[in-house]
Amino acid sequence: MTQKETTNIIIKLKEKGWSADEIIAFLAYIETHSPSEDEAKRALEQ
């Protein structure tokens, strides 16, 4: 993820009321999680 993308995500999530800890956890998840195709399908079906 680029610095610009990260900054834009942080700005938007803060505008929505997310705490710094929530944002950090979310960004860490994005950077480290490698979803399977089945996992992505299940998420979209919910």
Image (tube, rainbow, N blue to C red):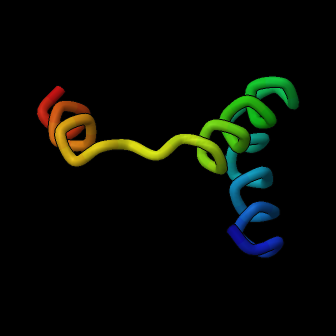
Q: Is residue 27 above or below residue 20?
A: below
Q: Quadrant of the N terminus?
A: bottom right
**Residue 24 image point, x, y percent:** 80, 35
Residue in the image at 79% along x and 54% along y: 11
Left or right of 38, for residue 21: right
**Residue 21 image point, x, y percent:** 84, 24
Q: Looking at the image, which is closer to me, 5 or 32?
A: 32
Residue in the image at 46% along x and 46% along y: 34
Q: Looking at the image, which is closer to me, 31 or 13?
A: 31
Residue in the image at 12% along x and 33% along y: 45
Q: Is residue 4 above or below residue 21?
A: below
Q: Quadrant of the C terminus?
A: top left
Which of the 4 image quarters holds residue 28?
top right
Q: Looking at the image, which is closer to me, 12 or 34?
A: 34
Which of the 4 image quarters holds residue 23?
top right
**Residue 44 image point, x, y percent:** 20, 39
Residue in the image at 70% along x and 44% along y: 27
Left or right of 14, for residue 1: left
Number of labelled discs? 0
Q: Residue furthest right?
A: 20
**Residue 31 image point, x, y percent:** 65, 50
